[in-house]
Image: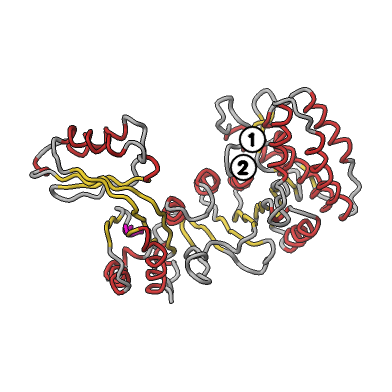
């Protein structure tokens, strides 16, 4: 089974973590291609190498001496080198970077050096090939990935290697200059490589053992999600669950490659597997848990619009949405009835103009019945099997009712894999606990 393994910043933080990565990779011959991040924090007050590199560039930009900050970066990498007893000339690399800094190099170049040096050290330690990402990940000048060229070059480079280490987070423009990904950098690199080599699994190694069914700050010791579909992941991510960014998983998702979230510090834990949306997913899903996860956000605002005989009038909702569209304000939900509808969005988006919006909605919709409510929380309960199981909604509403939680809004997506309820901000934590207890405990 061919695997691409990506290791995040905490997995590469120091020599001890490098040794763990080495053991994990050697434990499975299928892990032929390894993508690494720059060293992350070793402890709470520590600095991520990438943050220090951004700071270094800021010093250059504003003509402040950068040597003290860069010395911290050198010390971190030299410490890893010395503890692992590596025979690699880091001084030469540092001098090359400082020469670029003195010539006011682009920010993308300097911030990419964390991944570059991290991959060089690991390749030296594991005695395997180092492949520079700039030689295999290619961007167009508009910032998009040149997928065809990237796949061709990756396939050629990796075919010739028995085991290779590739830095994440960056690639190159057509002129050879460095270009970094905007977000989820190393995750995206791993996903692209997985698609290019047609990997059986893309392993994403981090400091957590997969995803949890609820926020552990709210629910004590929530159960781990063993399997989740990309669709469910999207629903939970949208409502604030801390998961991979869409851009990071897209290449693997498009290629139908499962992503396995694993913990470098608990390598025996199977983690969470993210799978596709095939028609057999629901039938093969975990029968012990009808729901997959619960997530939510606080501090939403609701604009409630009521107009008699609205159902007989064309374009009322369109006119209301234009009020927000004209201001570039994104809408989250629009639950509706026969003569009324609500527009739900984050309160911070409209905090200073709420009165203006109410008056404009009255004019646009030709009704005086427009009101705005604040302090609403939205909670989504997600599960791909929910559509096939009678009584889910009743069970959820009973759980909230039994805990004296008033439901202010109900919305269910057309995919039927989630139910969204709106409750008062003060009931947010209690509502999540009640739903979790009803379905999981």
Q: Quadrant of residue 183?
A: top right
- Indicate left or right for 194 with 340 as reference: right
Give percent across and percent down for residue 219: 48, 69
Q: Which residue is mark 1?
A: 180
Residue 274 part of the magenta segment: no
Quadrant housing the N terminus: bottom right
- Indicate left or right for 416 with 71 as reference: left
Q: Which residue is mark 2?
A: 185
In this rendered view, identify the residue nearer to me: 266 or 162: 266
As helix, strand or loop, the secondary structure at mark 2 comes to helix
Q: Quadrant of residue 363?
A: top left
- Please identify the dominant SS of the magenta region: strand
- The residue depicted at 60 percent of the width and 48 percent of the height is 198
Cβ–Cβ under 8 Å for marks 2 and 1? yes
- The residue depicted at 58 percent of the width and 27 percent of the height is 140
Which mark, by number, is residue 262? none
The earlier-in-sequence mark between 2 and 1 is 1
- Indicate left or right for 126 with 304 as reference: right
Q: Residue furthest bottom?
A: 441
Give percent across and percent down for residue 334: 27, 46
Give percent across and percent down for residue 15: 81, 56
* Up-down relation of residue 240 to residue 69 (above or below): below
What segment carries the magenta color? Answer: 418-423
């Amino acid at each position: 089974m061919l695997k691409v393994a990506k290791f995040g910043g905490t997995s590469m933080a120091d020599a001890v973590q490098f040794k763990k990565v080495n053991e994990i990779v050697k434990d499975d011959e299928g892990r032929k291609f390894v993508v690494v991040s720059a060293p992350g924090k070793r402890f709470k007050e520590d600095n991520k190498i990438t943050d220090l590199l951004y700071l270094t560039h800021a010093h250059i930009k504003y003509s402040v001496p950068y040597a003290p900050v860069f010395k911290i970066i050198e010390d971190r990498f030299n410490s890893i080198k010395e503890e692992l007893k590596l025979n690699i000339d880091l001084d030469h690399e540092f001098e090359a970077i400082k020469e670029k800094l003195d010539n006011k190099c682009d920010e993308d170049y300097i911030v990419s050096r964390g991944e570059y040096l991290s991959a060089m050290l690991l390749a030296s330690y594991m005695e395997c090939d180092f492949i520079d990402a700039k030689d295999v990940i290619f961007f167009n000048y508009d910032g998009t990935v040149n997928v065809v060229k990237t796949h061709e070059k990756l396939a050629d480079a990796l075919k010739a290697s028995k085991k290779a280490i590739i830095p994440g987070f960056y690639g190159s423009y057509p002129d050879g200059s460095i270009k970094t990904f905007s977000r989820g950098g190393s995750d995206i690199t791993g996903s692209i490589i997985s698609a290019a080599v047609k990997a059986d699994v893309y392993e994403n190694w981090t400091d957590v053992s997969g995803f949890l069914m609820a926020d552990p700050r709210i629910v004590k010791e929530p159960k781990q999600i063993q399997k989740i579909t990309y669709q469910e992941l999207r629903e939970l991510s949208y409502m604030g669950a801390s998961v991979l960014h869409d851009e990071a998983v897209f290449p693997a998702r498009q290629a139908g490659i499962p992503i396995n979230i694993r913990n470098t510090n608990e390598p025996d834990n199977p983690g969470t597997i993210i799978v596709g949306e095939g028609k057999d997913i629901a039938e093969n899903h975990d029968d012990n848990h009808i729901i997959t996860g619960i997530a939510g956000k606080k501090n939403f605002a609701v604009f409630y619009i009521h107009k008699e005989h609205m159902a007989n009038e064309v374009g009322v909702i369109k006119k209301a949405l234009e009020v927000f569209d004209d201001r570039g304000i994104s809408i989250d939900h629009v639950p509706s009835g026969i003569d009324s509808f609500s527009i739900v969005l984050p309160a911070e988006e409209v905090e200073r103009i709420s009165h203006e919006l109410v008056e404009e909605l009255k004019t646009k919709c030709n009704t005086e019945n427009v009101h705005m409510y604040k302090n609403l929380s939205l909670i989504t309960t997600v599960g791909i099997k929910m559509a096939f199981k009678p009584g889910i909604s009743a069970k959820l509403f009973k759980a909230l009712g039994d805990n004296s939680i008033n439901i202010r809004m109900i919305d269910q997506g057309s995919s039927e894999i989630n139910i969204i309820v709106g409750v008062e901000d003060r009931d947010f934590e209690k509502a999540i606990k009640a739903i979790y207890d009803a379905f999981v405990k």
